[in-house]
């Protein structure tokens, strides 16, 4: 049974594999929750789902250098493993896998990588070149190390989720990908570890992002042009918010919808508030 106290920490691949091999020998199912730490209630919702989906829950904490560009926030990304363990107390996490960079990449940056393909160069991939190749590579490594029955991600990182689902399907990886709905603060802002970088004024400005998604959903019955105009109108009028992109894509392909598209679609927003880059997403039904 999972511990009710602080979860133990495994820092080596061999240690985690030994723990999981023993669990599999007992016929237990395994869920993996990959994170970069700085846990918040959104991560805890993933843990709750994982605990319902499998007998044993492993949460990984690894700030992956492969998915950060040279001008991004790798060095200042928040790291506090003991605070993360405290947040997980009593939630049924059987172990935290917290390897060092040298444990995951003992010979330096890996030469073999997973390529995200054309979708990986769009939206977040255009703004953060190479990000999705690095993300998929570390997720593939984590799935190979843990060999979980299910892996759990949050809906907010919609492009990441799409690419992981496609990788698992294309490479015949025997892991189910579960997606948990975005958790939001009382002001509507999607929970993110990067929200900690916002000062009070920036936090108020960032509310324009969920407001823009709500405006997009309200305009969805009038078609794609109305959706884009509604979202852009909110964001362009928000002081302190620098818009990167607003897009609407087909959920099944992550390609931009046609002008005459009718049916399910996903709105995507990325914007910078002060030095902090935030993303969000919402489903809508065009027409």
Image (cartoon, rainbow, N blue to C red):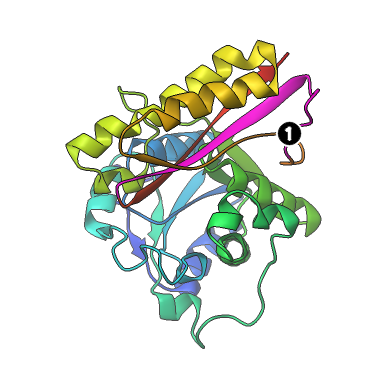
Q: Which residue is mark 1?
A: 250
Whether residue 29 is visible to the viewer of this picture, yes or no, is no
Q: Position of residue 194 (x, y in %)?
A: 33, 48
Asked where in the image residue 70 lies, by quadrant, the reply is bottom left
Q: Residue at x 51, y 70 (%)?
A: 66
Find the magenta span and give its range: 256-274
Up-down: is 40 above or below 9? above
In reply to whether residue 261 is colored magenta, the answer given is yes
Q: Residue at x 43, y 30 (%)?
A: 235
Left or right of 21 in this view: 225: right
Q: Quadrant of residue 82?
A: bottom left
Q: Nearer the viewer, residue 188 or 217?
A: 217
Q: Is residue 16 magenta?
A: no
Q: How many marks?
A: 1
Instruction: Please report the residue visible at 69 percent of the width from the left and 27 percent of the height from the top.
Output: 265
The quadrant in which the C terminus is found is top right
Local crowd at mark 1 within 10 Å, few (<14), some, or many (≥20)?
Answer: some
Pinpoint residue 115: horizontal percent, then vertical percent.
Answer: 70, 66
Residue 67 x/y as whole percent: 51, 65
| Placement of 207 over or under 120, stated as above or below | above
| Screen quadrant of the N terminus | top left
Judging depth in this view, the residue of 9 and 151 nearest the camera is 151
């Amino acid at each position: 049974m999972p511990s009710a106290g602080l979860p133990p920490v495994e820092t080596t691949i061999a240690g985690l594999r030994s723990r999981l091999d023993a669990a599999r020998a007992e016929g237990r199912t395994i869920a993996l929750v990959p994170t970069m730490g700085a846990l918040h209630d959104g991560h805890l919702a993933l843990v709750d789902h994982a605990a319902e989906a499998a007998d044993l829950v492993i949460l990984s904490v690894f700030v992956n250098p492969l998915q950060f560009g040279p001008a991004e926030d790798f060095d200042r990304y928040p790291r506090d493993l003991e605070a993360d363990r405290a947040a997980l107390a009593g939630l049924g996490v059987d172990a935290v896998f917290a390897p060092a960079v040298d444990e995951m990449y003992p010979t330096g940056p890996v030469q073999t990588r997973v390529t995200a393909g054309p979708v990986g160069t769009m939206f977040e991939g255009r703004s953060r070149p190479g990000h999705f190749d690095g993300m998929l590579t570390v997720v593939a490594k984590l799935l190979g190390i843990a060999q979980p029955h299910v892996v759990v991600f949050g809906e907010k990182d919609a492009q990441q989720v799409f690419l992981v689902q496609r990788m698992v399907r294309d490479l015949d990886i025997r892991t189910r990908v579960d997606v948990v709905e975005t958790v939001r603060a009382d002001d509507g802002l999607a929970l993110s570890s990067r929200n900690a970088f916002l000062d009070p004024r920036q936090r108020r400005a960032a509310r324009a992002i969920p407001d823009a998604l709500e405006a997009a959903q309200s305009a969805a019955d009038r078609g794609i042009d109305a959706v884009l105009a509604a979202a852009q109108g909110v964001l362009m009028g928000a002081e302190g918010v620098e818009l990167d992109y607003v897009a609407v894509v087909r959920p099944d392909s992550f390609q931009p919808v046609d002008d005459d598209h009718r049916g399910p679609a996903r709105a995507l927003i990325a914007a910078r508030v002060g030095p902090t880059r935030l993303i969000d997403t919402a489903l809508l039904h065009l027409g």
